[in-house]
Image: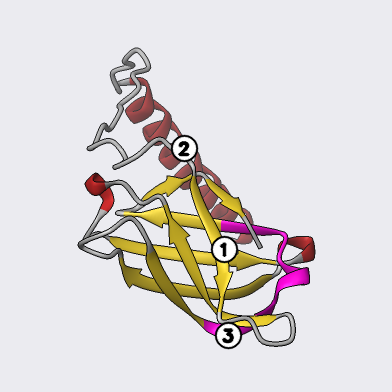
Amino acid sequence: MKTLRLLALVLAVAGIVSLSLSSAAALDVQALTLTSFSGPAACTSTTLTVSSTNVSGNRTSTLLVSNVPAACRSTEMQLTVYGAGGIVRATATTTTTGAGATTTVTLDATVRLNQVTGIALTIGSHGIQTTWAG
């Protein structure tokens, strides 16, 4: 009786496997294609200068983004301050100034200027090259 059940189970599994394989064999195979997405270009390709303001004892919680071109003004800006080992020291999200080429950014934390190793800046979701002027 056990042998008969085992045989029935083996036949059922074999039937399911053969159905699966025959279904897979019926699928159409198409050539590989690559889909691309293109959106609007960044508002600038120039490097913007980031410097410290309101420094007190080698610490600041505000930065100044300079040389912001007219095409980038009144657009959302996100700034991240990095320290050694890629540790995030502070972040900020603001809107670039509508008039003038500078925007003051208030950070969510106070940073030591000598611990800043890099600045990441996006304007309107595009990464923008920066120079850290300290």
| Magenta part of the chain | 108-119
Above or below, comparing residue 34 to residue 43 in the picture: above
**Residue for badge 1:** 51
Q: Secondary structure at mark 2?
A: helix
Front in this rendered view, residue 116 or 125: 116
Residue drawn at x 41%, y 55% is 122
Q: Quadrant of residue 132?
A: bottom right
**Residue for badge 3:** 109
Residue drawn at x 34%, y 39% is 44
* Amino acid at circle 3: Ala
Above or below, comparing residue 87 to residue 39 in the picture: below
Residue drawn at x 22%, y 37% is 40
* Amino acid at circle 2: Val
Front in this rendered view, residue 92 or 50: 50
Coordinates of residue 82 in the picture (x, y in percent): 66, 65
Front in this rendered view, residue 101 or 39: 101
* Amino acid at circle 1: Ser
C-alpha distance separating marks 1 and 3: 16 Å
The answer to whether residue 92 is magenta is no
**Residue for badge 2:** 17
Above or below, comparing residue 104 to residue 21 in the picture: below
C-alpha distance separating marks 3 and 2: 60 Å
| Dot 2 alpha-carbon crowd within 10 angstroms: few under 14, some 14 to 19, many 20 or more | few
